[in-house]
Image: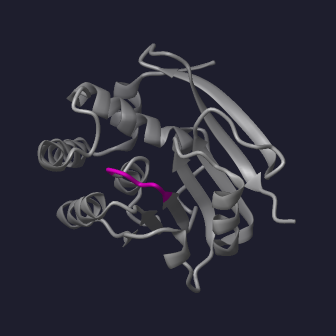
Amino acid sequence: MIEIDSKTILERYLDREKLEKFLDLVEDANRKINLYSRNIDRQELKVLVAESIIPVQLGMISPGSGPVLDIGSGWGIPSIPLLLWNQDLKITLVERSKKKADFLNLTLSRLGLRGTIVNSDLKQVLGEDKFSIVTLRQVAIDKLLFDSITPQITPDADLVYFGPSVDEKLFTDVTTTQYQIDRKSARTLIAAKFSQK
């Protein structure tokens, strides 16, 4: 079990001013369009941002990583914190909700970050670029989703998954990391390779 302190990870990896500006945008938008549960306070938002940086701390994502496909981006976790950490990352954020996708576009603009927002399902992402990292947070990976992802990734693509488990028949080199952040209940981060048979 890895113990993580959110304040330490945020101070080490993110510019405080940009972090606070991001959280201001999130809280303001949540009052209007319900981005997340209204029971989450600012400190809990900071914990979620810090969690987004754990793959960096563990070496799953590095400055030279990418391009990254973030599926089910919601209000930008983990993609916006990753861009705040390294503006040179090439990240495509896929979000079906128009309101959330509009929020992501506004946030990238206000923070001076570059990213591609796709307000649709994965079939609309297909293009010339192939992704070498796929990030998901609490999105169940079933065979249908797996089959939608595989045409869009490089043969050696990595999965970074904030969730309880993956079907090991779909992935290889599965590494599960248990961690606690700010002494809260244990959580799971999974790194794996896509198995493209």
Q: Residue at x 57, y 51 (%)?
A: 61
> x and y percent of residue 14 in the render?
34, 44
Rendered residue at 36%/51% (across/down): 74
Residue placed at 60% from the left, 30% from the top?
188
Residue 20 among magenta residues:
no
Q: Residue furthest bottom?
A: 128
Tell me if I can see residue 125 in this picture. no
- The magenta region covers 71-75
Q: Quadrant of residue 65?
A: bottom right
The picture places residue 15, in percent across and down from the top left corner, at 28, 45
Quadrant of the image for the C terminus? bottom right
Picture colour scheme: one colour
- Which residue appears at 37% of the width and 48% of the height? 81
Q: Nearer the viewer, residue 142 or 135?
A: 142
Residue 148 showing in the rendered view: yes
Q: How many marks?
A: 0
The answer to whether 54 appears left or right of 195 in the picture is left
Location of residue 187 with respect to 132 vertically, above or below: above
Q: Of 15 and 112, which appears nearest the observer?
A: 112
The answer to whether 107 appears left or right of 136 in the picture is: left
Looking at this view, name the residue that lies furthest to the right: 197
Magenta span main SS: loop
Q: Position of residue 121 (x, y in %)?
A: 48, 68
Q: Name the quadrant of the N terminus.
A: top right
Q: Does 73 appear in magenta?
A: yes
Residue 69 rendering spot, x and y as whole percentages: 53, 63
Question: Residue 64 sits in which quadrant?
Answer: bottom right
Location of residue 116 with respect to 81 vertically, above or below? below
